[in-house]
Image (spheres, rainbow, N blue to C red):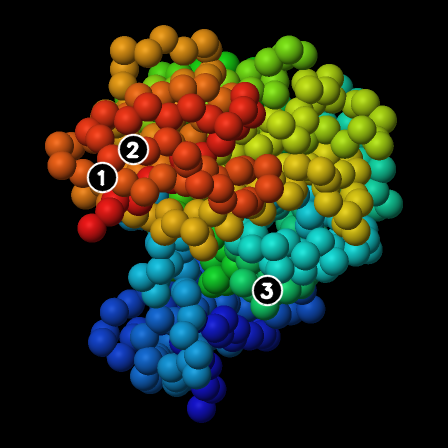
Amino acid sequence: MITVKRRDVLELEFRSETEYPNPFVDIMIDCVFRSPSSKEYVMPCFYDGNGTWKVRFSPNEVGQWLYKTKTAPKDPSLMVSGNFMIEETEKPIRGFLKTCPGKYWGLIYESGEPAFIFGDTMYNLFGVAFCGLDYETVLKRRARQGFNLIRARLQVSPYHPPAGYNDWQTRSTWPWQGSPQKPQFDRFNIEYFQTVDKVVRFAMSLGIGFEMIMEAWGFEYPFNQRDVFIPEYEELWMRYIVARYDAFCSVYIWTLMNEYEYYPDGDWRYNESADMWAIRTGKYVKSIASHGHPVAVHNGPIQPPFAQRFKIAPRVIDLIMFQCWGTTGEKDAWLAAGIEDEIASSMKGWEGSFILAEYGYERNPKLDERFPYHNNMSPEHTRRGAWRGTFSATGIIHGWEHTWGPWWIPNEDQDGMRYLLILKNFFTEIVDFYKFKPDSVVVDQSFNYELGKKPLAMSTPDKDIVIVYFPAGGTVNLVFPKGLAYEAKWFNPRTGKMKPVLTKNEVYTSRFETPDEKDWILVLKRKD
């Protein structure tokens, strides 16, 4: 009997006595899995070449399982049944990422551990690997640094406008058969997907998860030509990638499209048809993806609020991958102002979870200029944008020019990385991030602040700990419940070091002034 550890990937292989002209569509195979407690799960099978179909499944229940395939049309040689045993793991495992709206910043692992999302963007990672470049070096380093999520697109873009053609590309990364000029959307490039398999398995060994972007930008082919890439091809595409990857713990999120408002014609704007598309495809993914990974959309325009967009279909979209850059001009990009306000506005009334998934790509001055809108994305923007996001009670996903798009420099980090590592350490080692929620009441509202310079506060439910972020120094009056006294320290987000606050503050309303005009975090711990 086959024996697999809980939440490992079981892979079963089937062969047919019939030779199908197009094995991707001439027969559809599903596998029904029955748990020891009689729960049933159905996973689609996928064709993997050489007359072989496979199914992948990741059980989360210990004991003896049964499985049985069903085919349409009937093929007796592919209609098989059997059993296997699932054993408990020797070491504790996190399991899959799940949403938990209203708790722990909205995300938790199956083990019960709250998830602090600390991510990077490598849109073309799978294409880089397919072209034979080194992808292991940077993933290993990200794992050591504590990153747990990578944004990656299953369909790789050959370019990003205005001038971002890929320097690393040595072969076509077209994931279907045929070519963009003569596509065969009912057949898949098996060699490409076998490379993706290797990357997904490698990431799983490192404890890193992927936001799997099912459709890249809607402005690029074939997603911008819906008369060519018809719904039937779209469902075939989604079924195939769900079948191959849904069983992996390294799949954290299924994101339907990057900047989904590009649907249906590649014109970047808000329109209701994009929401209807997201609802339709979200329902389809949930109907075939039995492991229950969160289904997400990634936005472009940030209005109207998402609670309004998806009110007719609750619980279809689990997660918003929220795009917001704050200020990006030559004189104000350093401040990254407005991120927290745009999050609050867009998420008003939203009952799902969200992540600040895109707030800028730090400019690498060693590289030639191809993206004018990256020009002012300095380490200062990287740092402040990250703190504004986390003080909105959300994980963050950043990006770097040298591994984001047309370049691939896996052996070094850009300057702003040190600031993100300090932030990650603060929220995972110095304070328990999941205990905090934004707290506007503690900040005296009578002060007038310049745009982007108002302090942001968070606190634990009983106000045992209060933390305040000053984006650009300054003074604040904090209002506490009567009778509470705090010990205060300054945390430096540029160095990661603490220093004492010299002001005596055992009063109900306390005034604090930062050591200088740079950004600081005030950490207040209640005295017994």
* Residue 16 as seen in the image, left or right of residue 352: right
Quarter holding the N terminus? bottom left
Q: Nearer the viewer, residue 376 or 127?
A: 376
Q: Residues within 10 Å of mark 3 (few under 14, many from 20)?
A: some
Q: Residues within 10 Å of mark 2 (few under 14, many from 20)?
A: some
Which residue has dot 3 on it? Answer: 206
Which residue has dot 2 on it? Answer: 505
Mark 3 vs 2, N-terminal side? 3
Residue type (three-letter) at the residue carrying disc 2 = Asn
Q: Residue 504 lies in what quarter of the image?
A: top left
Alpha-carbon distance for marks 1 and 2? 7 Å
Residue 421 shows in the view: yes
Mark 3 vs 1, N-terminal side? 3
Which residue has dot 1 on it? Answer: 485
Q: Residues within 10 Å of mark 1 (few under 14, many from 20)?
A: many
Marks 3 and 2 in Cβ contact (< 8 Å): no
Q: Nearer the viewer, residue 205 or 289?
A: 205
Residue 168: x and y, percent? 83, 42
Q: For the residue labelled by badge 1, is the local secondary structure a helix, a strand or a loop?
A: loop
Specify the label residue 112 is tagged with: none
Q: Residue at x 61, y 70 (%)?
A: 52
Residue type (three-letter) at the residue carrying disc 3 = Leu
Of badges 3 and 1, the one in the foreground is 1
Figure check: 470 above or below 100: above
* Residue 83 as seen in the image, left or right of residue 154: left
Figure check: 205 above or below 228: below
Alpha-carbon distance for marks 3 and 2? 45 Å
Marks 1 and 2 in Cβ contact (< 8 Å): yes
Mark 1 vs 2, N-terminal side? 1
Q: Nearer the viewer, residue 287 or 412?
A: 412
Q: For the residue labelled by badge 2, is the local secondary structure a helix, a strand or a loop?
A: loop
Q: Residue at x 47, y 16 (%)?
A: 452
